[in-house]
Amino acid sequence: MNLALKDIRHGLFRFVLTCFGLGLLMTVVLAMIGIYNGLVSDALAVVKAPAADVWVVEAGTKGPFAEASSIPADTRDAIARMPGVSEAGAVNYQNVEASHAGRTLRLYVVGYEQGRPGGPLTITEGRGIGASHFELIADRKTGLLPGETIRLGRNRFTVVGLVEGAMNSGGDPAVYVMLADAMALQTELDPSAQRVQAARGAVSVKSASVAAVIARLSPGADVDLLTATVRQWKHLAAVTQAEQEQLLLVSVVDKARRQIGLFLGILLSVSAVVIALIIYTMTMEKLKQIATLKLIGAPDSTIVALIVQQALILGASGWGIGLMLILSVKDYFPRRVVLEPFNAMVLAGIIAAVCLLSSALGVRAAMKVDPATALGS
């Protein structure tokens, strides 16, 4: 007879309620792990999308993501002619707000050149941009569908395709448009501001530029040589793909990562204490039954197995409930929640270790019980 299962059946409702409460706590822990992963994944999504080898930006900046960068659009031609460069494309990035279907969307507009690096690599639904103006590809998180139109600036754009996982570091979903449209969106003035400028005899107060030029290199090309050559031009800077990703993580999302990481550490510590208290309390409530087992000659191994098995069943149940809950609700979070199997397995290992350590406290108390207490009232 398995005493652990027998005891659980005796107080089944209370045990199930305890497991469910622990499961809710594990849901929060898994959610924080997923939000942490999602924050990093979102921050790197737009950086990784072009599959670039080198980023050419304005000198003295950490652009185009950590800081603003503005370079002449014709820089792309100069970079494309450099030895080792197989492809080069100019790109623009900007945040805009647009109204659609009665709600306000905050979008991350990516402008790129047709047939050049900078656009989405994979389109999950619909097609790529085929017209020279007023078509866009949207991330699925925008809620836009192929065939719909949305107003950006003064023009209406038709959604022709959808992608997945295209976000900026703030979690705003991306939309891809032609570079010419993005530059027009960047430089166009509000109608009232345009009237003021016209009255002053000015055509525009802004000049068109691009945020960066991205380059893909030929196999065997020397990345360090190319970046060193670009840096010799006083108005330009160059960083490799790996350096760009590191800049983004250190400069843009570092504080958010540390804050979420600290909160996750605190939450794991609280969870460990809660699990320990639950297991210890369950053991203390059974001291008289444990004394009875000792009185009838039950070996210590039976008592130890009772406590350890219940602790592991409790931890496994809480972990399983938490995992099922977070997988059911993660798509409803405002920020992307990314859970990897490795994360779930690591948490399972932590819970198992905490349960074993906590059961050791219960075992220690059980071993001190005098069998004679079973005869008391």
Image (spheres, rainbow, N blue to C red):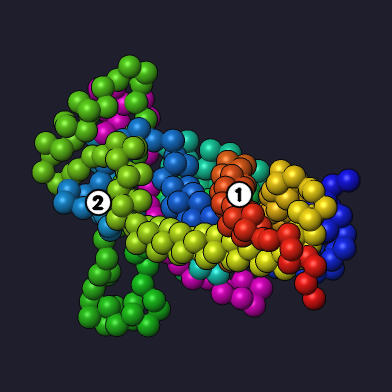
Q: Give x and y (percent) for residue 32.
A: 54, 60
Q: Secondary structure at mark 1?
A: helix
Q: Is residue 86 magenta?
A: yes
Q: CA distance from mark 2 to mark 1?
A: 48 Å
Q: Residue at x 73, y 59 (%)?
A: 371
Which residue range is magenta in the image? 79-104
Mark 2 — residue?
A: 62
- Residue under the point 79% across and 48% down: 298
Residue positioned 51% across, 51% down in the render: 37
By secondary structure, the bulk of the magenta-drawn segment is best described as strand
Res. 367 mark: none
Q: Write down the quadrant of residue 56 in the picture.
A: top left
In the image, residue 188 sits, relative to residue 124, either above or below, namely: below
Please name whichever residue, 244 or 274, is drawn nearer the observer in this view of the structure.
Answer: 274
Foreground of the two, 127 or 140: 140
Q: Indicate the quadrant where residue 217 lies.
A: top left
Q: Residue type at mark 2?
A: Lys
Disc 2 + disc 1, Cβ < 8 Å: no
User: Is residue 244 left or right of 232 when viewed as pictured?
Assistant: right
Q: Is residue 105 left or right of residue 220?
A: right
Q: Is residue 62 visible?
A: yes
Left or right of 173: which side holds 210? left
Where is 242 relative to 153, above or below? Answer: above
- Neighbor class of circle 1 (other Cα within 10 Å; few <14, some 14-19, many 20+) is many
- Name which residue type carries label 1: Leu
Q: Which residue is mark 1?
A: 356
The vertical placement of 349 against 86, above or below, is below
